[in-house]
Image: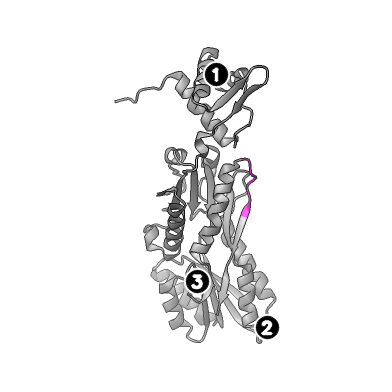
């Protein structure tokens, strides 16, 4: 059965609200004139006049003769937000709760959102298949496990605020929330600074700008190590249990023994690394502040992220920025 088509004045109402939401209009801002609306929406003057009268009756706009029409209530900016958290199934193939890193992140995020009195929705997407209709029904869409292969054209197709966690993109509407490992990498080198050391950085195979930044931070940190120090990088899938990855790791350590191993290593890889390089210092990355290595308190990170999201939602014209949360090094 075909869905009933909404009357034209209701279609225009939704179009205008979506446009104002996407453009970041706030209470008191002037809206378009009747003639301006006709130019971009191609509805008739009769439909435009009726729609504006309806919005005025609802208390959404106020019309002043000779001055124009102004927004007096923003229905999309009420105190109650619908916040969606979406992860990439092409990256976290087994599901988010099979991944300790993302599990800690989403649990901390959900707890904070709900305690703030908002609705939390969780879902997933694939590189080339974003649930646009779902995104459009939300106030804020938070995406994680994004890579350079992910089609982010959705940003310009929805009026919802789009945020990226652990990924950086240069876009005027997007606020990216990253973990800054640079100070922690330098602290690690300083901890081993009394002697030259052979460093092995275990890198993820995923193609992302954020992982490239972490490689640069690792290179910069080791460049300040005592003369005779070296850095090698090995790309593997840190979540994979494949024999090929295990063999690549074994071959690397046999050919180039390491004094310090750091980077993307989950709990299972940690056990293998301890067996393959029993004398090496091992420093993985995690969202468990009680673990050794490079850690971030997930709850603290999300408590920093969410107020920024709320503020940017209320001021939709705020320029997109990169917000960094610093990791801590624990020997």
Give the residues drawn in magenta, as a range. 317-322
**Horizontal relation, residue 112 to residue 188: left or right:** left
Q: Residue furthest top?
A: 46
Looking at the image, which residue is at 50% across and 16% down?
50
Mark 3 secondary-structure assignment: loop
Q: What residue does disc 2 label?
A: 228
Report x, y in % for residue 79.
49, 43
Nearest the camera: 195 or 207? 195
The magenta stretch spans residue 121: no
**For residue 38, above or below residue 101:** above
Provide the major secondary structure of the magenta segment. Answer: loop
Q: Which mark is residue 42?
A: 1
User: Residue 231 sits in which quadrant?
Assistant: bottom right
Q: Which mark is residue 161?
A: none
Nearest the camera: 14 or 182? 14
Looking at the image, which residue is at 50% across and 71% down?
289
Nearest the camera: 243 or 40? 40
User: Can residue 133 be spotted in the picture?
Assistant: yes
How would you rate the neighbour count of disc 1 (Cα within 10 Å): few for under 14, some for 14-19, many for 20 or more?
A: few
**Horizontal relation, residue 111 to residue 40: left or right:** left
Q: How many marks?
A: 3
Q: Check contact, mark 2 vs mark 3: CB within 8 A.
A: no
Report x, y in % for residue 64.
63, 20
Looking at the image, which residue is at 49% across and 50% down?
143
Report x, y in % for residue 197.
62, 83
Q: What residue does disc 3 label?
A: 289
How would you rate the neighbour count of disc 2 (Cα within 10 Å): few for under 14, some for 14-19, many for 20 or more?
A: few
């Amino acid at each position: 059965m075909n869905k009933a088509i909404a009357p034209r004045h209701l279609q225009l109402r939704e179009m205008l609200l979506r446009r104002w939401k996407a453009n970041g209009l706030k209470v008191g801002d002037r809206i378009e004139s009747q003639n301006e609306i006709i130019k971009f929406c191609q509805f008739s003057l009769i439909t435009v006049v009726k729609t504006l009268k309806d919005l005025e009756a609802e208390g959404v706009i106020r019309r002043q003769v000779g001055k124009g029409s102004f927004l007096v209530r923003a229905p999309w900016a009420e105190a109650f937000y619908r916040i969606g958290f979406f992860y990439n199934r092409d990256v976290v193939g087994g599901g988010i709760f099979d991944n300790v890193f993302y599990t800690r992140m989403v649990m901390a995020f959900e707890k904070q959102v709900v305690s703030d009195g908002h609705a939390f929705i969780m879902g997933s997407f694939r590189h080339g298949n974003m649930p646009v209709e779902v995104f459009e029904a939300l106030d804020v869409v938070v995406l994680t496990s994004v890579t350079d292969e992910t089609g982010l054209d959705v940003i310009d197709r929805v009026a919802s605020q789009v945020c990226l966690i652990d990924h950086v993109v240069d876009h005027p509407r997007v606020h990216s929330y990253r973990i800054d490992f640079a100070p922690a990498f330098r602290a690690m080198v300083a901890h081993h600074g009394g002697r030259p050391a052979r460093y092995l950085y275990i890198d993820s195979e995923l193609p992302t700008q954020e992982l490239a930044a972490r490689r640069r931070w690792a290179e910069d940190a080791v460049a300040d190590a005592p003369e005779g120090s070296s850095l090698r990088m090995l790309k593997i899938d840190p979540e994979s249990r494949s024999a090929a990855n295990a063999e690549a790791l074994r071959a690397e350590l046999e050919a180039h023994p390491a004094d310090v191993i750091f980077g993307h290593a989950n709990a299972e890889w940690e056990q293998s690394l301890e067996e393959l390089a029993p004398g090496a210092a091992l420093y993985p990355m995690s969202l468990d502040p009680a673990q050794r290595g490079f850690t971030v308190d997930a709850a603290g990170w999300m408590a920093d992220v969410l107020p920024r999201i709320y503020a940017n939602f209320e001021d939709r014209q705020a320029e997109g920025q990169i917000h960094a949360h610093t990791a801590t090094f624990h020997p």
